[in-house]
Image (cartoon, rainbow, N blue to C red):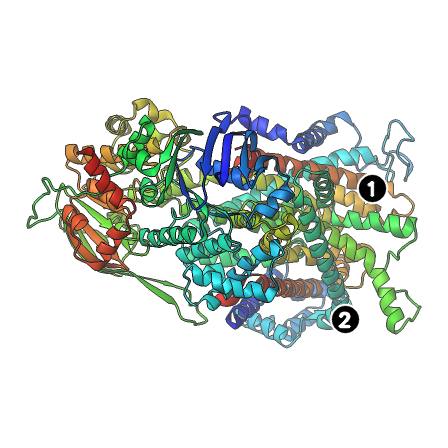
Amino acid sequence: MSLLSVTNLTIALPKGADRPHAVKDISFDLNHGEMLCIVGESGSGKSMSANAVMGLLAEGLSVARGSITFDGQDLVRLSEAQMRTLRGRRIGMIFQEPLTALNPLMPVGRQIEEVFEAHGMLTPAARRDRVIDLLTEVGLPDPSASARAYPFQMSGGQRQRVVIAMALALEPAILIADEPTTALDVTTQAQILRLLDDLRRRHDMGVVFITHDLGVVADIADRVLVMQSGVIVEQGAASDVLLRPQHPYTQALLDAIPQLKGMTDDAPVPTAAPLLQVKGLHKQFRSGGGWLGGKPRVVTALDDISFDLQAGETIGIVGESGSGKSTLGRAIVRLQDVDRGQVLLNGRDMAALRGEALRHDRKRVQMIFQDPYSSLPPRQSIGKTLTEGQVAHGTPIAQARDRAAAILDRVGLDAGSMSRFPHEFSGGQRQRIGIARALVLDPELIVADEAVSALDVSVQAQVLDLLAGLKRDLNLSMLFITHDLRVAGQICDWLIVMQKGRIVETGDAARILNMPSSDYARGLLAALPGRDFETARAAARV
Amino acid sequence: MNKFWSRYARNRGAVIGLVLLGVVVVMAVLGPFLTAQDPWRMVQRPFLPPFQDSALPLGTDALGRDVLSQLIHGARVSLLIGLVSTLAALAIGVPVGAVAGYFPGWPNDLLMRFTEFFQTIPSFALAIVLLMIFQPQLHFVVLSIALVSWPPVARLVRGEVLSLRRREFVEAGIVQGLRHRHILIHHVMPNVLAPIIILASLMVATAILLESSLSFLGLSDPNVMSWGYMIGAARTALRTAWWLSFIPGIAIVFTVLALNLVGEGLNDALNPKLNRGDA
Amino acid sequence: MARFILGRLVKAALTLLAILVLNFFLIHAAPGDPAMIMMAETGSSDPQVLADMRARFGLDQSLPMQLALYIKGYLTLDMGWSFRRDVPVFDLIADRLPATLLLTMTAFAISLGLGVLAGALAARRQGGWGDTIISTVALLFYATPLFWMALMASLLFSVGLGWLPGFGYETVGANYTGLARMGDIALHLILPATTLGLFFTAVYARMTRASMLEVNRLDFVKTARAKGLRPSVITRRHVLRNALLPIITLAGLQAGQLVGGAVLTETVFAWPGIGRLMFEAIAQRDYNIILGVFFVSAALVLLFNLITDLLYMVVDPRIRLQS
């Protein structure tokens, strides 16, 4: 008999939503000790299904029909008080955002103790001992000090370990994990995944793991459930679904995953006069320490960064959070001043420009931003957004509009978009508009800062295609900043790997992705989810 | 616009508030034409209680003046002072907050110290001091109220601008070579409009309360009939003619309540993100 | 932590200094120089007296020198002279300050305690009848002029029902001592403190409600629910504490209004505090008293701010531990 059985579950959305049901007629089982992955893109209803099992649907949402059978009872029919006795004790849950999942005003040990307290278990002294055990089990350094720490004193990965310890405290039969590693760096993600896998084996837990990342699925899943717009389109054993997908949507999702490979073809040869020469960039950030003294915290974001970029070349800057890659990109577009160093663009030092001269030269380097939902001015038409920069640099408005329309067409949007506003477009379309804005000033160099990271994988593939096409047709020179090695491999000729403000390795993209020479790059690649699957898939295709 | 209305109308209190406010506005605008009575002229015996004389439905005050006529003229003064002083406060607070929020470094520090300083000073006491120094004339009353009520505007605008400034569209504007003034006015400020409108409706209410308090203390223009003045003048007769204090007080409560309700309705209508229940 | 407190103290001192400078320029902005105003107050018109007075108060000195003298005066507790009453302003204020402190502190405690309680109750069931009643009452009090509420309260409870004394600080001529006197004062305190407190109760109740609803949406509340904690525990331990942070900040900001409101309450109830003193000085156009009271009330606000800063530090570990 299965541990948990969901039958024909349907969750109604409130009136006025874009569809009547968030989730429609889904059925699945979870067995003891099984890792079940629910995978889907945003809006697929994957999180909502998990919340329904937990009885934690957001206000306004309700189960319209269907049943969730666990421990011989239908969870849908339980009262809130009955449900409360199960939460934390029989079903545990961990969430996506470790930064906000903990109460900022309470020591984390105390927050774990609350689980025992909620279910009237153990004496206060015994609870404290168990907390230390749990923190040890999830691998936190110095468990007794960790127990006394407040969330703000811990890193994202450490906080996620605390949340896991909390969910495991009473050894629940089921653990629901809602995108638990999405907000984490890839090496931290690999550690947390290993920890979860280890724990479910040791405690024989059934785990429902919700994710958008098929690589993660491939690494950990026993069984997979693919959701699209509130329905399950395919489910089965992980090896079947991933290697022999039946449903076209699953196939499309799998095809959209960027292959881990480098572009080996036609990389421009170094010349004596590269387009961009970065020489000895330094930047330190100081925080804390006021006029009353106290030690300021110093973080070195850029430590002697130098490299060249040839015209028509795309260089990828890769690294984890805190590597300084974003600071580097921002320094080159002059959103960030540096302490010292030069940014020579066709021989002119951009880092030394000030005032009007800087404003005038800004059009030579443009940027594509990460978040399509915040990178366009919300209360301004697309036409205005695409022309105001040109007008500011002296182009007559009529000419500016013609050029905007032409570029819009090139990124795959019709000229009618000019009179519309950002909220009328999807995330992918907005990102196309963001690309158009960068192109419209005809820059010599484009800096793309995590330009596809906020997009669903299928949209991401389309935008990457668009960028690759533009690069080919317009001979774009680009600095492509990303945390995602697969994405970098798709579009970059050359890679620069950064760690803690320093360049640890540079080289041909294909070479680094296949045979990294630095330990750090090797670690990054090893932590990349879904590598074995990739090999298997490549083999199956041949 | 339709969406705005349907969201506004969902808040029943806000609709009531709008009706109440409409009544006060109509009274203030049309009232003086409908009642021929000069609010300063003695028309009957003093202390005539309400509902005794159909020509004077609300009776007379200590000097035999028509209370209804005073009430109507008072509505005019209250609304006018509330509105103009709010506009004046916005004229100070919005630019201060916008500049402080947009430009980091010393403009921010300096302007915020300045704002904080004004916010620390007890505003009512400062208004009293200002009116003692200035002459008690209508425009000085308005000015004093504006001078003590702009700091919350500056704080609000600064906070909003500060958070908007971190949004990528501001950086996109900078990278394109747009001028900061252009980005601030065309990209940032349109997004601050809604909270400013909501705050403004509440500020009109606060200004009316402040004016009534000042005229109660005898610090307002002695040549202008206002609700606070009526209460202040009737105070000594509280034991014998309580209604003279009661009636104008009720008028203030209704007007201020109406404005607050309208403010809440505007908040519901302009800030849909706060009502995630209907996502 | 010590640095945090020290920082606040330095800031408070600088603010007081700035208020003195403001005061000084306000006197000079007034039509006619201070000596002429004082002359007018005393009814004399002798030019020699005017010159003497200018010399006596340093008005014949340069402006910066005068400012320095003015600040030095305040530093040595010399707040000027009340010509109407012919006593030092400092003595008048020192005499009246305890009554105001008693009134405002009581009103602050009442309004913060009651307001947070009411707001928390309202937020527990958004849209329920408890919420409707609390929100409506809060809205009504929020819209009621303080002085009018005071008048109506004294009309109802003192003039009409005769339950409570509506005037003064204690029963004149009763000559109570010890506990009896304290009881008498407490009885006199009820009406002014509640009317002053009610408006702010409404303010804090509305803020608490809004803040709790905001916090209710945060992720860690969901984590708490996922643990199986009871809603009452979640509210008390997780929601309320976090919701209090903005309330404490706002309570500090509102302190100015509380002290300003004391002028009105003390006027209506003849409470012998500095607010009442200010009202009397308005009628007599006694500038020195008004500016003195203004300065002291600003100092009071800073005191309230310091209290709220300390409260904030108790609640928020990020401030307690980081500096």
Q: Nearer the viewer, residue A326 or A139?
A: A139
Left or right of residue B82: residue A186? left
Left or right of residue A283: residue B244? right
Q: Which residue is mark 2?
A: C95
> Taking A541 as reference, is A208 above or below it?
below
Is label 1 in a helix, a strand or a loop? helix
Residue A56 placement: quadrant: top right
Q: Are marks 1 and 2 on the same chain?
A: no
Q: Which residue is mark 1?
A: B246
Mark 1 and mark 2 in contact? Answer it, CB < 8 Å.
no
Marked residue chain, label 2: C
Q: Residue at x 78, y 47 (%)?
A: C148
Residue A60 in the image: state x and y as whole percent: 57, 33
**Label 2 neighbourhood size at 10 Å, few (<14), some (14-19), many (20+)?**
few
Q: Residue at x 70, y 38 (%)?
A: C128
Q: Nearer the viewer, residue A353 or C77?
A: A353
Q: Residue at x 93, y 68 (%)?
A: C173
Left or right of residue A540: residue A52? right
Amino acid type shown at disc 1: Phe
Q: CA distance from mark 1 to mark 2?
A: 34 Å
Amino acid type shown at disc 2: Asp
Residue C71 placement: quadrant: bottom right
Q: Residue at x 78, y 54 (%)?
A: C194
State how many labels appear: 2
> Taking B30 as reference, is A514 above or below it?
below
> Taking A79 as reference, is A355 above or below it?
below
Q: Quadrant of the C terminus of chain A?
A: top left
Residue C102 in the image: state x and y as whole percent: 76, 65
**Label 1 neighbourhood size at 10 Å, few (<14), some (14-19), many (20+)?**
some
Using the rendered image of the protein, determine whether residue A123 is visible from the camera's viewpoint.
yes
